[in-house]
Image (cartoon, rainbow, N blue to C red):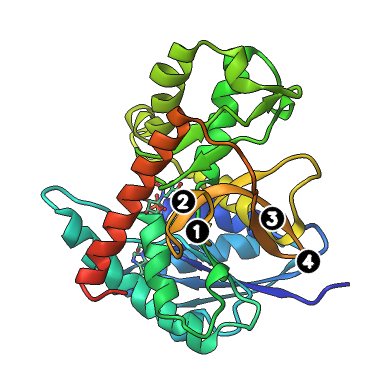
Amino acid sequence: VQGPVTVTVTGAAGQIGYALLFRIASGHLLGPDVPVKLRLLEITPALKAAEGTAMELADCAFPLLQSVDISDDPRVAFDGANVALLVGARPRTKGMERGDLLEANGGIFKPQGEAINAVAADDIKVLVVGNPANTNALIAQAHAPDVPAERFTAMTRLDHNRAISQLASKLDVPVSAIKKLTIWGNHSATQYPDLYHAEVNGKIAAEQVDASWLKDEFIPTVAKRGAAIIEARGASSAASAANAAIDHVYTWVNGTPEGDWTSAAIPSDGSYGVPEGLISSFPVTAKGGKFEIVQGLEIDAFSRERIDASVQELAEERDAVRQLGLI
Ligand code: NAX
């Protein structure tokens, strides 16, 4: 029997937080036998709302949930954390330039990185969900020099799951028939969902769809799905984002199945021409609590162009935060 795992969730009173916490507490993040201690980090004005969520968590009487603590101080909230889900971020508001957005998020992810460095457990694993997720992860990582760089990751699992679902629906197959899908690059509109290595019942997906569907429908539908959800729901993706965060961490801790891989934004080691250090999405396997980039895939000209465009955007974001002194 494993001891309790301390999980810190930032932005805990937000809509993703509300969809996420109950699933963590019921054992979906780590497994059905792993007790959990929750730490919720919120900004001061949202502490009361976080208390309300904590009351509801108590009312679920989850057998695995050992404690819930709430704080507005990162040094308290990340103390002893084994897993950190960085969900709270500063959204882009009207008239905000990219520089303003990056700077505002620097004000959040720099102190959080410092606190993780100072007080988190030695085995801390960090998933950044709050946008711009890849670059926010880079900022946090830059301020946690004592934590191995590969422990900082950003979420493209929602894009991955969206792509699987779109493909399954197009080919009228169950989602379980689809393997080896990859999201490359940034969690943004430039992301590249790759069907040239994905398999449907063991056959290459790109060979089973029209080239025009792949290029003109599939890729933009996946990339713009977030906007379509906002249009329909009147609010951004919450339960599906929480579900993807659960999937990301569960896979990281418990491994990928044989014969399959997943997508996660992790620090590049230079693979596939992605500059070392950029936190970019790759095809990854997980084993023994570590992600590894799938090696040796052939990249055709169509894919190369799209991967390069998204990676270029990541490099520009990195340069912008560097100029702002955030990394
Ligand atoms: P909400 O606005 O509902 O909640 C955000 C919460 O974060 C708020 O309660 C706020 O008080 C809190 N917060 C702000 N600054 C904080 C700080 N310094 N410390 C702790 N908490 C802080 O947003 P929600 O819909 O939950 O989305 C959260 C983030 O996820 C956004 O940045 C959003 O863009 C991002 N998303 C990322 C996705 C991905 O695939 N990577 C998809 C879904 C989502 O859009």
Vertical placement of residue 136 versus 228, above or below: below
- Name the kind of residue labelled 1 in the image: Gly
Report which residue position mark 4 lands on.
34
Report which residue position mark 3 lands on.
250
Q: Nearer the viewer, mark 3 or mark 2?
A: 2
Do tag 3 and tag 4 residues touch (Cβ < 8 Å)?
Answer: no
- Name the kind of residue labelled 4 in the image: Val
**Secondary-structure class at tag 4:** loop
Q: In this orientation, does residue 49 appear?
A: no
Q: Distance between the Cα atoms at labels 3 and 4? A: 12 Å
Residue at 33% in and 71% down: 108
Q: Earlier in the sequence, mark 3 or mark 2?
A: 3
**Secondary-structure class at tag 2:** helix
Left or right, residue 227 beside residue 95: right
What percent of the width, then of the height, locates residue 314? 34, 53
| Quadrant (top left, top right, bottom left, bottom right) of the C terminus | bottom left
Report which residue position mark 2 lands on.
273
Mark drawn on residue 22: none
**Residue 137's quadrant in the figure?**
bottom left
**Secondary-structure class at tag 1:** loop
181 or 167: nearer the viewer: 181
Number of residues whose C-alpha sits closer than 10 Å to that of mark 3, classed few (under 14), some (14–19) or many (20 or more): some
What percent of the width, then of the height, locates residue 233? 38, 32
Do tag 1 and tag 2 residues touch (Cβ < 8 Å)?
Answer: yes
45 or 254: nearer the viewer: 254
